[in-house]
Image: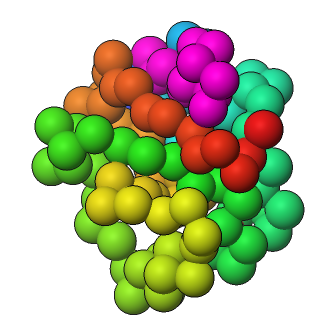
Amino acid sequence: LKNWRFILVKITYVESNGTKHTVDVDEGLSIMEGAVTNSIPGIDADCGGGCACATCMVFIDIEWKEKINTMSEEEESMIDFHEHKNDDSRLSCQISVTEDMDGMILKLPESQQ
Ligand code: FES
C-alpha cells in the first residue's frame, strides 16, 4: 500500500436549466462516470463510455482546456455529428479526472435533460 492515494476532485456539473451539482469524483474515473455515479441528470451515457453515442457531451470552458487530455480523432468525429456542439464540446467519457481538475465547472447541453 506504499503508493496508495485516494484523491477526490470537486467537479460542478451545470444542467442546461442552470441547476448546479457539485460533487466529489474519484481521480481516475471519467467525467461521465463521475456524473453517473452521482446520479447527475443529463448524462445518459448510452454506450457506456465507448465514444459511440455522444449522449455524454459537456461544454468545458477554455480556461480548463490545458488541464484535460486532448481529443482523439474518434471523439472529434462523434462531436462533429452533434446538433448542439460548439467549440467547448467534449465527450465526458473520454476525459479522465485528475487532481488538476479540482474546481472545474462544466455545462450540459440543452439536448440532454
Ligand atoms: Fe457514449 Fe460517451 S458515453 S460517447
Tell me how the rendering is colored.
rainbow
Q: Is residue 18 left or right of residue 3?
A: right
Nearest the viewer among 103 and 86 is: 86
Q: Is residue 28 visible?
A: no
Q: Which residue appears at 33% of the width and 17% of the height?
A: 103
Between 78 and 19, the residue placed more toward the observer is 19
Residue 62 in the image: state x and y as whole percent.
19, 44
Residue 95 at x, y = what percent?
45, 54
**Residue toward you, 24 or 80:** 80
The residue sitting at 35% across, 37% down in the picture is 98
Residue 24, quarter of picture = top right
Magenta includes 15? yes
10 relative to 15, above or below: above
Q: Is residue 42 left or right of residue 13?
A: right
The region drawn magenta spans: 10-20
Is 65 placed above or below 54 here?
above
Is any atom of residue 76 visible in this view? Answer: yes
- Residue at 46% x, 22% y is 11
Quadrant (top left/top right/bottom left/bottom right) for the C terminus: top right
